[in-house]
Amino acid sequence: MIRLFLDNRTAVLLLLPFIIGLYVVGDMLAVEHHISNRTDGLFFNTTTTSNFWSYFGQSFLILVNAVLLNAVFNNYEFLDKNTYIISLIYVVLTPMFVPLNQFSPVLIAHFFFIASLGVLFQLKQNTEGKMTIFNAALLLSIAIIFLPYLIILIPVMLMMIVINRSFNLREFFICIVGIGVPFIYYFSYLYLTDQFVFNWKLPSFQMHDYRSALHLYPIVIIYIGLLIISLLSLSARMLKSSLRLKKQIQMLSLVFTLLFLLGCADFYFSGSLFYFSLAIIPLTYFLTYAFLSKRSGIPANIFFYIALLYSFVKFFLDFTQL
């Protein structure tokens, strides 16, 4: 399967709905459904669970995000040829982090975050970048509206701009304006409808009950294994990459570091992998280099197939009996 997606064959994308469909069937037949009562995102008060529209909405967003993430990779030449392995990695890993049986703002935030990265990669050293920066900031702001703790990515976006081009105070100001526009509209809406309240809470600053999150610990272990393999291959890749690719990887590494730390903190305090799931986005790019590496290729394949196997088997494991 991995070899099929590594090649430059667009037709393999037709396999993605089939793979997602298998996850939906597995979730529907699961011996134990894990429902999150967590309310997150400024627009979400409740979630609908275990019905057709929840499965359809989550599955559709995974498919769209996978294709968009892959398109960004190919359009900005992270490799010297097109590949579609990114979409496969995203489709396999995401259902382990984000439940399919309840609609949540997480995957919508994924979409706008991926779109923001795609716009930001358009920046070049000696070209006009004000509109590009504004659009990237606007998209990131919408992602923040759906997942509020992502507000800590604002300084990271400013640092990413500096990595790509020289410091420009006017561009920094435009970035802040772009981030502020969606919030102005949203808070105006709240004010005009007398709903000026937040429906999300800060986490309780103590470790979550590990017994309620036993089904998540294997996922974290698999993720860390894939991450270690990816970083080993990435360091070797950077020795012979172009200057532009190095800048793009630096930008992704900066984003990944913060998302990984945010995900770890959120998992520790809430026992949720919602924010951890965002770190899948840069990992898909890093892991691609591992699959193409002679040294890391075999362990990357082994760990990926372990992830693929567990992503299905977990539906039929009853962790309440452990």
Image (spheres, rainbow, N blue to C red):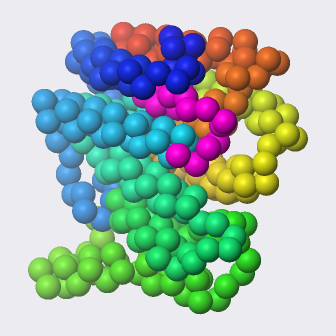
The image quarter in which residue 160 lies: bottom right
Q: Quick check: 206 above or below 271?
A: below
Relative horizontal placement of residue 117, taking residue 10 as reference (left or right): right
Q: Where is residue 277 in the image (x, y as percent from the top left)?
A: 49, 41
In the foreground, 171 or 307 = 171
Q: Where is residue 264 in the image (x, y as percent from the top left)?
A: 60, 46
Q: Is residue 83 magenta?
A: yes
Q: Quick check: 42 above or below 239?
A: below
Question: Which stretch did the figure color magenta?
Answer: 75-92
Relative horizontal placement of residue 272, taking residue 238 as reference (left or right): left
Q: Is residue 308 magenta?
A: no
Observer able to see residue 148: no
Observer able to see residue 134: yes
The residue located at (25%, 62%) in the rendering is: 43
Q: Where is residue 94 in the image (x, y as percent from the top left)?
A: 44, 32
Relative horizontal placement of residue 202, taking residue 76 as reference (left or right): left
The residue located at (35%, 59%) in the rendering is: 146
Count of labels in the image = 0
Q: Where is residue 142 in the image (x, y as percent from the top left)?
A: 36, 65
Relative horizontal placement of residue 199, taking residue 110 as reference (left or right): left
Q: Quick check: 113 above or below 98?
A: below
The image quarter in which residue 49 lies: top left
The residue located at (55%, 87%) in the rendering is: 173
The residue located at (78%, 30%) in the rendering is: 233
In the foreground, 158 or 9 = 9
Q: Quick check: 83 above or below 245?
A: above
